[in-house]
Amino acid sequence: MAILESDKPVNLTQREIAVIVAKSITETGLPVPTGRVRNDVNHIQIDPIILEKRVTQPKMGVRLQFVTKDDFKVDFNINIEEFEAYPGGYMTDLFERLGEMLRNGLKMRKNTKLLNSAMYDILTKEAAANG
């Protein structure tokens, strides 16, 4: 997409930005069909939102929600002003953070399963040994 490859500012509506970002997410193969989120664009739910750092400084935004093949639910909040200022860099940063979060989530899920398995073994063996 030419907009995402450019360093020039853009001027788009919330919906247009949401569709562009959703299509670029879809190209990665991350979203999968599910009944947990509404299917607005390629298994991604799109909602307009207001982002507030302070109550007096509301910013227009878009929330994208989808589920990955590893059953992680992902929520992206896109700041319209930041996206319009530098679309290519914004998306690069977004995907870098997402990759790290998914990798860490898988690692935590694996470690939790190992811990739960070890605790179960300890508890059941102790109960069997103590009769």
Image: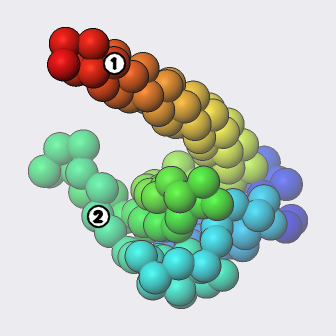
Residue drawn at 60 percent across, 54 percent down: 70
Q: Secondary structure at mark 1?
A: helix
Here the colouring is: rainbow
Q: Residue at x 49, y 25 (%)?
A: 114
Is the residue 103 above or below the residue 68 in the image?
above
Is residue 80 left or right of 61 when viewed as pictured?
right
Q: Which residue lies under the disc numbered 2?
A: 50
Q: Is residue 128 left or right of residue 131?
A: right
Whether 103 is drawn above or below 48: the answer is above
Of callouts 2 and 1, the N-terminal one: 2
Front disc: 2 or 1: 1
**Amino acid type, residue under disc 2 in the picture:** Ile
Q: Secondary structure at mark 2?
A: strand
Image side of residue 126 versus residue 61, left or right: left
Q: Is residue 48 visible?
A: yes
Image quadrant holding the N terminus, namely bottom right
Residue 118, image x, y percentages: 42, 20
Q: Position of residue 72 (x, y in %)?
A: 50, 54
Q: Return the residue at label 1.
A: 125
Give the quadrant of residue 96: top right
For the image shown, how many numbered marks are present on the structure? 2
Which residue is painted at 78% across and 59% down in the image? Answer: 28
**In the depicted view, which residue is nearer to us: 68 or 7?**
68
- Name the image quarter holding the C terminus: top left
Q: Residues within 10 Å of mark 2 (few under 14, many from 20)?
A: some
Under mark 1, the amino acid is: Lys
Extreme front residue here? 131
Measured as percent of width and height from the top left, residue 110 is found at: 54, 31
Give the x, y percent position of residue 116: 38, 28
Q: CA distance from mark 2 to mark 1?
A: 54 Å
Q: Can I make out residue 115 in this image?
A: no
Residue located 46% across and 58% down the image: 73
